[in-house]
Structure formats: structure tokens, C-alpha cells
């Protein structure tokens, strides 16, 4: 019987204490607290003080703070440990970029190298500084027509681990490219040949790969991924939709794959080959860039329209 009374007293004591603490919490957030009384053992009317046990319970309650507004600027970055800052810069330097080395006006300097001296010093751990030499002149399609001497040599910073290189190759002939040092060319791992303007039906009569493509692949012996981006093939042959388009796409995939596998074999290259089709049906019909090398210079046109009406 005595044990039962002690247990009942202990439970009543805990319930009253919890109710009092809950009432104080509601009062702190603007709610009307429920009228309650503290047990005599926890509150002394003569002194108006709470027991140490109740104080410890109140101290353990989480503080009620107003919700923080979202930060517009990451002002805490300078306060982070240097190791965490460097990891963030490493992630930024590991973002793949498309490098168009055939265009002298193309700015290839990574933004993190222009932030501060400290960040540049850290970024150069991942980017290699290279000197690109461009030819004196070239076709207007390549964006390097009659280059002045000050533009014939450029300093570029490249992360060969992730950066992707793009080369336009109309009629299977690479344009006048910038010339990197052979050691730097050998570090390229991902290359995309942007194939523009070639009549795909003529592939059936090609017995051997053009010398220019073989020479290009010979300069990148460590290439891991070779992408062939085929443009404007669908509208040129007059196949616009339906099962005919799918069959023609499948046939072209086989032709291009066979063609470039021969080129890779002659160049001694064992990269993974992927054929990607991109015709005008996939492009944005909004006004396009006037730069033929940097984007679509033609709008989408129907194969049934006059061939001179889409320029």
C-alpha cells in the first residue's frame, strides 16, 4: 500500500510539473496559458523561487526564435574553414564546360579564376594554362576570318578531366583549328564533332574516312568519348515525320557508325562512339543567333517549302 501511494504521488508530481512547463511555453509564444498551479515542492510561496529541478527542466526547453529570412547572399562563406572553401571551389572547377577552340573570340577563362588571387591559386590546381595558336585566316563559318596578330595566340585554361571540346566538320573536313601543344591535345578526353551541311546519302559511296578526320583523331590518343552530332539531315532528304523518319534515322546511324569506326581504327583510337541526331525539328523556333558558328543561323523550315526561303 505504501509503494502504491509513493508511485501515485510521483506520477502526480511529474504531471503537474509538465503542465506548468507547457503553460509557460504557450505563454512565451503568445497563447493563453492554462491556469495551473505548481506543486508545493517545486514552488515556495514565501520566497517566490522555483526549485533547482524545475529550473533545470526549463533550461532544457528549446529557445523560441523567429524564423530566419532566406539569405540573398552567402555572406558566411569567408567564415567557413579553408578546407570547406577549397572543396566548394573544387566542385565549381569540376563543372563541365564546352570549349570551342576553333573560335578565337570565344572566352574560355573559367569564372572562378577571375574571382580573387586566392581562388585563382586554388583553381589552377584543376585547370591547366595552355597557349592556343590560331591560323591567320579561315572561312567565315569558323569565326576566324582574317585574324589580326593580337588574336592569333590566346591563353586558355582547361580542365581536361571534365571539359568537352567541340569541332565543326562540314563535309567531313575539320576547319582551321587552334593548335595546342601535342601534349595538351593528348589530354583531351571528350570530343564532339559537329557535323553540319553534309548530305548523309553520300556516305554509302565513301570507301575510306577523309584524311582530315583521321588526322584529328590521331591527335587525341587518350580520347574516351567521341560524339558525332549530325544536323540538318532530316529536312535535306525530305523525310519529315512518321515511320520513314525512324527508318532513315536507323540507317544513318549505321552509316555514320561504320564510317567513324573506320576512322578511329586508322587513327589507333579506342574511344566510345555515340551518334547524336539534331535536326531543325529539335531547334528553337524563336529568333536565332546570327553567328553561324555559335548557334543556329537558320530557322526551322518545312521540306516542302522553297529551299531558298529559309535563309
Image: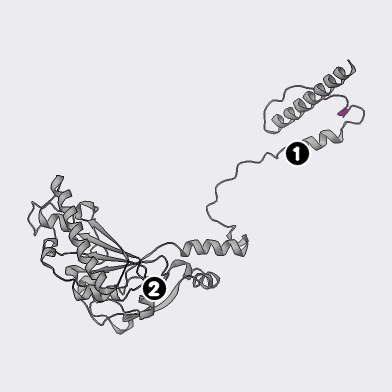
Q: Position of residue 228 (x, y in %)?
A: 25, 63
Give me the residue at 10% from left, 53% from top: 238
Element at label 2: loop
Q: Is residue 71 visible?
A: yes
The image shows residue 22, relative to residue 105, as above or below, that is above
Residue furthest toward the top?
A: 1
Name the spot of residue 293 as percent of width and height, x first: 25, 67
Q: Say which of 307 and 250 sits in front.
A: 250
Of label 1 and label 2, which has the lower sequence position? 1
Q: Which mark is residue 52?
A: none
Location of the N terminus by quadrant is top right
x, y (%) of residue 286?
24, 53
Left or right: 254, with 1 as reference point: left
Magenta segment, which residues? 34-47
Query: Between marks 1 and 2, how big is the CA–CA gap?
Result: 59 Å
Q: Which residue is mark 1?
A: 60
Disc 2 designates what residue? 187
Q: Is residue 78 above or below residue 143?
A: above
Closer-to-camera residue (292/276): 276
Q: In this view of the protein, can residue 292 be seen by the observer?
A: no
Amino acid at each position: 500500500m505504501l509503494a502504491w501511494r509513493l508511485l501515485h504521488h510521483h506520477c502526480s508530481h511529474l504531471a503537474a510539473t509538465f503542465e506548468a512547463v507547457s503553460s509557460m511555453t504557450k505563454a512565451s509564444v503568445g497563447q493563453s496559458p492554462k491556469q495551473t498551479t505548481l506543486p508545493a515542492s517545486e514552488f515556495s510561496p514565501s520566497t517566490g523561487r522555483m526549485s533547482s529541478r524545475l529550473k533545470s527542466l526549463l533550461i532544457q526547453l528549446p529557445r523560441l526564435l523567429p524564423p530566419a529570412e532566406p539569405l540573398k547572399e552567402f555572406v558566411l562563406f569567408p567564415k567557413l574553414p579553408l578546407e570547406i572553401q577549397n572543396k566548394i571551389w573544387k566542385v565549381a572547377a569540376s563543372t563541365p564546360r564546352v570549349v570551342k577552340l576553333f573560335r578565337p573570340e570565344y572566352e574560355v577563362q573559367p569564372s572562378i579564376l577571375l574571382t580573387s588571387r586566392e581562388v585563382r591559386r586554388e583553381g589552377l590546381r584543376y585547370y591547366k594554362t595552355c597557349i592556343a595558336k590560331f591560323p591567320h585566316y579561315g572561312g567565315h563559318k569558323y569565326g576566324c576570318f582574317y585574324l589580326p596578330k593580337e588574336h592569333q595566340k590566346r591563353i586558355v585554361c582547361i580542365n581536361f578531366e571534365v571539359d568537352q571540346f567541340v569541332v565543326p566538320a562540314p563535309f567531313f573536313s575539320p576547319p582551321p583549328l587552334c593548335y595546342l601543344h601535342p601534349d595538351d591535345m593528348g589530354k583531351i578526353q571528350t570530343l564532339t564533332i559537329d557535323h553540319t551541311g553534309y548530305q548523309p546519302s553520300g556516305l554509302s559511296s565513301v570507301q575510306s574516312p577523309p584524311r582530315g578526320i583521321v588526322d584529328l583523331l590521331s591527335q587525341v590518343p587518350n580520347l574516351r568519348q567521341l560524339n558525332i552530332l549530325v544536323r540538318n539531315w532530316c529536312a535535306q532528304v525530305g523525310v519529315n515525320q512518321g515511320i520513314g523518319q525512324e527508318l532513315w534515322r536507323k540507317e544513318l546511324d549505321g552509316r555514320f557508325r561504320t564510317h567513324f569506326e573506320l576512322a578511329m581504327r586508322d587513327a589507333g583510337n579506342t574511344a566510345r562512339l555515340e551518334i547524336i541526331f539534331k535536326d531543325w525539328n529539335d531547334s528553337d523556333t524563336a529568333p536565332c543567333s546570327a553567328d553561324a558558328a555559335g548557334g543556329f543561323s537558320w530557322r526551322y523550315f518545312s521540306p516542302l517549302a522553297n529551299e531558298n526561303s529559309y535563309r
